[in-house]
Amino acid sequence: MWGNSPHPNHQSQIINHQSPIHIGSCAWTSEDWRGSFYPADLPASRWLAWYARVFNAVEIDSTFYASPPAHAIAHWLAETPAHFRFTCTAPRTITHQFRLRGCEAVLADFLAAMQPLHGRLGPILIQLPPSFAPPTDATALRDFVLALPRGWRFAIEFRHADWHQPRFVKLLEEHGVCWAWSDRTPVADQDQAPFGFLPETADFLYVRLMGDLQARNEAGGEHAFRYKEVLWSRAAAIESWAVRLHKQAEHVKNIYILCGNHYEGFAPVTCRQLGARLGLDFTLPPTAVPESAPSGPRQMKLL
């Protein structure tokens, strides 16, 4: 069925191209997927085309570090079908260096760089650092939200619990900015879904299944695991998310769901399993490994 040609318009595996639910991974460039999702001999320059034959969205994580050049965006557009949607993270210069202060010019330059992608671009994620907190940063957040340009969709991911207050929910709600829902549940609580403080502040949802980011690296900074198969199954949590998101789909225009490798160890399987529960058939290619994870401590395979 899959053959050797990774062209995105050839035998697409997505049943409903008009679905308001967009599911994909946080980036498509994981080297660990070579031989487990991508054919071992497929050039990295064709990975996106192969990926887009399976899923209908992806989060561009490279924009966190730098704006993409025009030729990169042209390549992304050429390699993906019309129904495919991109999301992206705002540059860390805005969120971590300027901490939302005095960054109007940087944001304008970034949006200008992303303009060629605009017709296919979903939300832009403002990923705030854990140290960004209300006592020192509430005014900066308010001023930033008030100054956001029209014609773009934004989602903000808060990583400090003190933002969980009605006044900040109201701020985002009044300006149509999405409060991003992020599941960073530790591996020890892998069957739980965080349904504590998940406000709806826009006519779309932005959901990130990120998993246990603290467990991803060894003390020296090396990756602790090879992300090429399911390492710790979160089937119960995925089912809980599916039930909630199915209900949300009844009254929001779009839902963007992005899954990281650290959620179960292999984002393509997480995307496929959640998609199946939400009515999207994401058929993994023959190169994909079995979906089930072994039980017991052996499921965490060190490099």
Image (cartoon, helix red, strand yellow):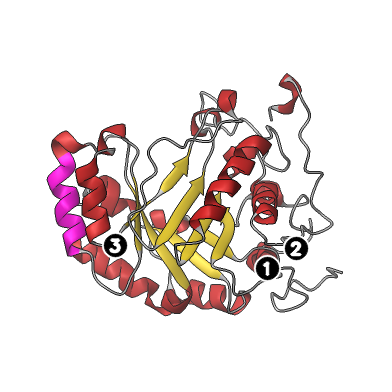
Quarter-of-image position of residue 215: top right
Mark nearer the N terminus (3 vs 1): 1
Q: Position of residue 114 (x, y in %)?
A: 39, 72
Observer-nearest residue: 214 or 29? 214
Residue in the image at 56% along x and 26% along y: 189
Disc tally is 3
> Mark 3: few, some, or many residues within 10 Å (few <14, many ≥20)?
some
| Residue 208 position within the rendered picture, expressed as x and y whole percent measured from the top left | 49, 48
Q: Is residue 288 visible?
A: yes
| Region in magenta | 137-147
Q: Of the residues shown, which amino acid type is indicated by label 3?
A: Gly
Distance between the Cα atoms at labels 3 and 1? 36 Å
Kindly indicate whether the residue at mark 1 contacts the one at mark 2 (C-beta within 8 angstroms). Answer: yes
Q: Secondary structure at mark 3?
A: loop
Residue placed furthest toward the top: 297
- Please tell me whether the stretch drawn in magenta is mainly helix, strand or loop: helix
Q: Residue 176's mark?
A: 3
Could you tell me residue 105's position as x and y percent? 20, 66
Residue 71 shown left or right of residue 24 in the figure: left
Q: Secondary structure at mark 2?
A: loop
Determine the CA span between mark 3 and mark 2: 41 Å
Q: Nearer the viewer, residue 256 or 55?
A: 256
Q: Is residue 138 magenta?
A: yes
Q: Nearer the viewer, residue 303 or 136?
A: 136
Considering the image in quadrants, where does the C terminus appear? top right
Question: Residue 252 is drawn in which quadrant?
Answer: bottom left
Q: Nearer the viewer, mark 3 or mark 1?
A: 3
Q: Name the mark on residue 46.
A: 1
* Up-down relation of residue 207 to residue 55 (above or below): above
Taking the spot 62% from the left edge, 75% from the top edge, the residue there is 79
Residue beneath label 2, please? 42
